[in-house]
């Protein structure tokens, strides 16, 4: 497993939810959104992406549907209201976590005071 994939462990679900915040995408477009949004750092294999999408769909965080385009059948995904709420919650948790880690790494008190 690439170092980037290992670093994403535990964070992949929320990153996938974030790629769908602006609207539905099919699986490959989600994979590309992760890659381009991270400046190429998160170029994950489909064998990592698709099981996570299926897990999120089973949890009710995503809704999936099949479509046909360019003669190919594709599975598209979009956030459900439950998925949107989870994204908002996880984003808040991430900000708090990142602030605490930054405070430790930069040797500053947490929470940061202006």
Image (tube, rainbow, N blue to C red):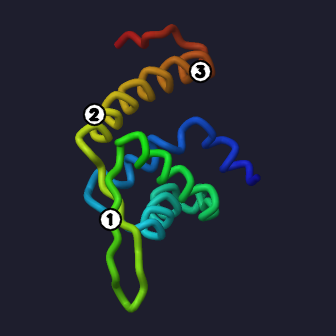
User: Circle 2 sits in a helix, a strand or a loop, which is it?
Assistant: helix
Q: Which residue is found at the position 23% from the left and 41% from the top? A: 81
Q: Nearer the viewer, mark 1 or mark 3?
A: 1
User: Circle 1 sits in a helix, a strand or a loop, which is it?
Assistant: strand
Q: Please indicate whether residue 105 sits to the left or right of residue 86 in the image.
A: right
- Residue 82: x percent and y percent? 28, 37
Q: Residues within 10 Å of mark 3 (few under 14, many from 20)?
A: few
Residue projecting furthest to the right = 1
Q: Which residue is found at the position 48% from the left and 64% from the top? A: 36
User: Circle 3 sits in a helix, a strand or a loop, which is it?
Assistant: loop
Instruction: Decide which of 36, 73 is in the foreground and name it.
Output: 73
Q: In which quadrant is the C terminus drawn?
A: top left
**Residue 65 tag number:** 1
Mark 3 and mark 2 in contact? Answer it, CB < 8 Å. Answer: no
Residue projecting furthest to the left = 81
Decide which of tag 3 and tag 2 comes sooner along the chain.
2
Q: Nearer the viewer, mark 2 or mark 1?
A: 1
**Residue 106 tag number:** 3
Q: Which residue is found at the position 45% from the left and 66% from the top? A: 27
Relative vertical location of residue 46 with respect to residue 71 in this rendering, above or below:
above
Relative vertical location of residue 69 with respect to residue 55 in this rendering, above or below:
below
Q: Which residue is found at the position 38% from the left and 54% from the top? A: 19
State how far apart marks 3 and 2 are (Cα): 32 Å
Relative vertical location of residue 13 with respect to residue 107 in this rendering, above or below:
below
**Residue 85 tag number:** 2
Instruction: Decide which of 63, 112 is in the foreground and name it.
Output: 63
Instruction: Decide which of 18, 113 is in the foreground and name it.
Output: 18
């Amino acid at each position: 497993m690439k170092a980037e994939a290992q670093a994403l462990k535990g964070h992949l679900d929320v990153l996938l939810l974030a790629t769908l915040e602006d609207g539905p995408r099919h699986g490959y477009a989600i994979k590309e959104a992760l890659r381009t949004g991270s400046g190429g750092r998160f170029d994950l294999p489909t064998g990592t992406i698709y099981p996570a999408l299926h897990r999120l769909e089973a949890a009710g965080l995503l809704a999936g549907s099949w479509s046909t385009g360019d003669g190919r059948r594709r599975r598209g995904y979009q956030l459900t209201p439950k998925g949107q709420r989870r994204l908002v919650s996880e984003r808040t948790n991430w900000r708090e976590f990142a602030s605490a880690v930054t405070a430790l790494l930069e040797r500053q008190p947490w929470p940061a005071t202006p």
